[in-house]
Amino acid sequence: MTLSYCVFSSKQDVVGVLQNLLPAATAAHSLWLDVAHRARVGRDAADPPHAADAAR
């Protein structure tokens, strides 16, 4: 709601737009890291190490 006010108001407040976009970028990056981590952990759990690899 704040973002729409800042974009569509007559003043078009750039600071208001940035205050919404910067946290959104941080949240998107954190989400990407979480999804990548979950995919990596899931892939590792689905492929257990072989006995020959564990003996090395």
Image (cartoon, rainbow, N blue to C red):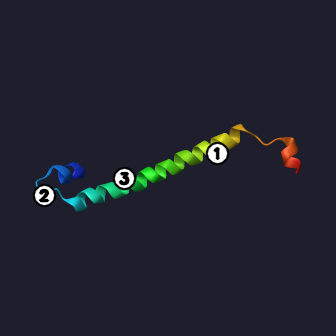
Mark 2 to mark 3: distance in Å? 22 Å
x 12%, y 58%: residue: 11
Residue to which mark 2 is pinned = 11
| Pointer 1 local density, CA inside 10 Å: few below 14, some 14–19, many at least 20 | few
Query: x, y (%) of residue 17?
Result: 25, 56
Q: For the residue marked with disc 2, what is the amino acid? A: Lys
For marks 2 and 3 on the same chain, the one whose residue lies earlier in the sequence: 2
Label total for image: 3
Residue to which mark 1 is pinned = 41
Query: x, y (%) of residue 5?
Result: 18, 51
x 87%, y 43%: residue: 52
Asked which secondary structure carries label 3, the reply is helix
Asked which secondary structure carries label 2, the reply is loop
Point out the residue furthest to the bottom here.
Answer: 15
Viewed as shown, does residue 2 lie left or right of 48? left
Q: For the residue marked with disc 1, what is the amino acid? A: Val
Viewed as shown, does residue 16 lie left or right of 39? left
Asked which secondary structure carries label 1, the reply is helix
Viewed as shown, does residue 22 lie left or right of 1? right
Point out the residue furthest to the left here.
Answer: 10
Front label number (1 vs 2): 2
Query: x, y (%) of residue 8?
Result: 16, 49
x 79%, y 43%: residue: 49
For marks 1 and 2 on the same chain, the one whose residue lies earlier in the sequence: 2
Q: For the residue marked with disc 3, what is the amino acid? A: Ala
For marks 3 and 1 on the same chain, the one whose residue lies earlier in the sequence: 3
Query: x, y (%) of residue 34?
Result: 53, 49
Residue 51 found in image quarter = top right
Residue to which mark 3 is pinned = 24
Disc 3, disc 1: CB below 8 Å? no
